[in-house]
Amino acid sequence: RLSERLERVAAHVPADARLADIGSDHGYLLVALMKRGVIAAAVAGEVALTPFHAAQRTVRENDLSQRISVRLANGLAAIEPADGITAISLCGMGGETIRDILDRDQARLSGEERLILQPNGGEQPLRLWLMDNGYRILAEEVLRENRFNYEIIVAERSGPVRYTAQELYFGPLQLQQRSPAFLAKWQRLLRLKQRTLSHFARARQAVPEEQVQELTQQVGWISELL
Ligand code: SAM
């Protein structure tokens, strides 16, 4: 059984995909999708030894060693051209980390892959990278599990795309859909940011003007949104 979060990620994996899951930790996502017959081939990439061994163990215990390759590698270096990868998942990492992994080894990307990204924070810099590299966002979700907000961003290369500053901040599709989970996330963040601003105002040490301005702009955007 997958967590609700990984279950929502799994829902964005196309049937018969050849999926590379980078930062796969225990390998749960790939094993579940393979057992369900959703994916045709799989590569699990892990940079750290303990999760790499954990993924090997999950794959072995499920008799899937012939169908899921588990590789110790940094980011996209886990992917070989012969894998014919059609989708890449990067889940449970900060948005900046996901961006850096995508940016570091762009030569490993054919440009045909669907990217299924589940950042924990740092969504704005990740969306900026997607825009700058010609990826269009095809689907977005916000979900809450165990008192955390998670976002899912699905993108494919499309040629030039333009998103406004607010679209990069909130998510272009989320802005349109205004789902209950999305609105609840931003209501909560608005309260937090307003509280931080009032702390700033009362702080004895000067807070950098830039930081105050950025936060004030965000509070303005969120207030407009809600
Ligand atoms: N993807 C799983 C999930 O969503 O449940 C596991 C998330 S876990 C919090 C993040 C994993 O990413 C860790 O196991 C970590 O070792 C791995 N990781 C971090 N940076 C990586 C990189 N550059 N290349 C491969 N794996 C990486």
Image: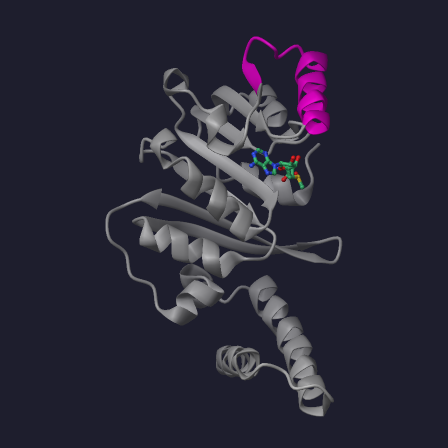
Give the position of the N terminus as an image quadrant.
Answer: top right
Q: Is residue 25 above or below residue 222?
A: above
Residue 3: x and y in percent read 69, 40
Looking at the image, which is closer to me, 10 or 58?
Answer: 58
Residue name at image x 62 percent, y 23 percent: 31
Q: How is the image coloured?
A: one colour
**151 relative position to 170: left or right:** right
Q: Does residue 100 appear anywhere in the picture?
A: yes
Ligand 1: quadrant of the figure: top right
Residue 14 visible to an observer of this rendering: no
**Is residue 23 or residue 116 the one in the foreground?**
23
In this picture, residue 168 sits left or right of residue 92: left
Q: Quadrant of residue 9?
A: top right
Residue pictured at 41% horizontal, 43% vertical = 103
Q: Was residue 54 drawn as part of the magenta stretch in this picture?
A: yes
Magenta residue span: 49-70
- The image shows residue 10 at horizontal and vertical percentages of 55, 36
Name, please, the residue furthest toward the left: 159
Total marks shown come to 0
Taking the magenta stretch, the answer to whether it contains residue 162 is no
Q: Is residue 206 above or below residue 90?
A: below
* Image spot of residue 123 (x, y percent): 51, 57
Q: On screen, 25 above or below 34?
A: below
Q: Which residue occupies the foreground of this view, 8 or 114?
A: 114
Name the spot of residue 119 as percent of width and height, x first. 56, 50
Q: At 37% from the left edge and 36% from the top edge, which residue is drawn?
A: 106
Residue 27 in which image quadrant: top right
Quarter of the image for the C terminus: give it: bottom right
